[in-house]
Amino acid sequence: MIRSILGTALIVLLGATPAAAQPGPAAPTNLRCPGPDLSYDPPTQQIVSAWEEVVNYPVTLDDQGPLGVALDTSCNLYVADSANHRIAKISPNGDTLAQWGTDGRGVGQFHRPGAVALDTAGNIYVADSGNDRIVKLSPDGQVAATWGKCTPGVPPCSPSPGDGPADFFGPNGIAVDGSGNVYVAESVNNRVQKLSSGGQSLARWGAHGTAPGQFDSPWAVTLDAAGNMYVSDLNNNRIEKLSPSGDPLLQFGGTPGADAGQMKQPRGVAVDTQGNVYVADTQNHRIEQFAADGSFTGQWRRCEDGPDPCQIPNSGKGPGEFFYPRGLVADGAGQLYVADTSNNRVQRLKLMVVPLPDPASD
């Protein structure tokens, strides 16, 4: 069950309102997960948020815990548990429902899977990063397809990196749109590749560089309800927004640092139904929030006192504190899930309706 660690992380969201109408048919599965009912009576109730731990794993020696997270339409959480070379399915209450995979290169095996995504039918797509391939699983975890370059070997071929259509080199991020198309961020090929649900390469965008539409190790990709892509551009220290056809629309970040709106090797990115963008600012051990226009709006992190209060980010183990966070996903209500990698756990920013404080108690 979820081990609630509410307390000092409680944040009152004054004036918050429930999420807008359900997103349209183009929305990816995570935005179709409705999340909690946030209907409330403003004179007597309020919406609050607090960080809590959803699931944790034994500490590993190489700081490679959960890397990627995804949600299905029923709000089950899927975790790319890199250290254990498997995908885990977790219920909304924190119970482990299923686990698939062992370390290796064969059918049904993974090596350091970096990301996971789902389509609306419940099929699971795994960025099998260490094997430079994409593995498609049925809803019950059976291998349905494997995509990538295969060189002759035993068994019948060996997964290999490649830069051609439907090849992969460093596939660290994956997303699926509402029509079943698959998007893969390839860190070594410096591109985002779009594939059909059957594995046919439909488009490839990007090249190595710093200009709009170029990348220096793209690490994660996510989609909004309109089909726009958001890519964490690791070594350019920025997030790039691309249109559904791959045209550059917006870049934010770009200056390495720890000040508000800056980033240092961001690895995860998520978008909620309101268009807010969340970034796992990995090397700064924090999560940043941006408005749809790319303007900085907030952050969660542990801080140490410096010349200015709270200016030195540091890793932490408490609620809303992080140690090299990586994967992110948002649900339809605006709750945020974070793969807190080196703490070997997944945290959730939980939203709740609670009574307003009693003035008489002040």
Image (cartoon, rainbow, N blue to C red):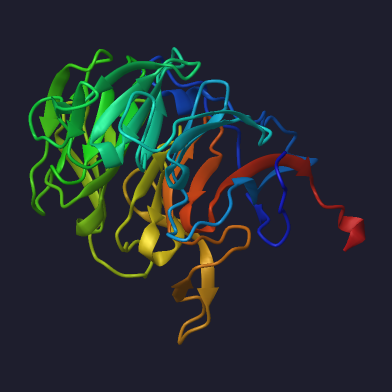
x, y percentage for residue 248? 16, 39
Does residue 96 appear to the left or right of 126 in the view shown? right
Q: Which residue is nearer to you in this view: 164 or 73?
A: 164
Task: In the rendered view, tell whether residue 177 sits above or below residue 121.
Answer: below
Quarter residue 16 falls in: top right
x, y percentage for residue 118? 42, 23
x, y percentage for residue 234? 25, 54
The residue located at (45%, 77%) in the rendering is 312
Task: In the rendered view, tell whether residue 201 sits above or below residue 12.
Answer: above
Q: Evaluate whether residue 331 shows in this view.
A: yes
Q: Quadrant of the N terminus?
A: top right
Q: Quadrant of the C terminus?
A: bottom right
Q: Which residue is nearer to you in this view: 202 or 107?
A: 107
Q: Which residue is nearer to you in this view: 323 or 34?
A: 323
The residue located at (47%, 27%) in the rendering is 31
Does residue 93 appear to the left or right of 241 in the view shown? right
Does residue 145 appear to the left or right of 346 in the view shown? left
* Name of the residue lying farthest toward the bottom: 307
Task: In the rendered view, tell whether residue 156 sits above or below residue 272.
Answer: above
Tally of numbered discs: 0
* Name of the residue lying farthest toward the right: 360
Q: Evaluate whether residue 14 shows in this view.
A: no
The residue located at (29%, 40%) in the rendering is 129
Does residue 135 appear to the left or right of 55 in the view shown? left
Q: Which residue is nearer to you in this view: 356 or 287?
A: 287
Quarter residue 89 falls in: top right
x, y percentage for residue 189? 13, 42
The residue located at (27%, 46%) in the rendering is 219
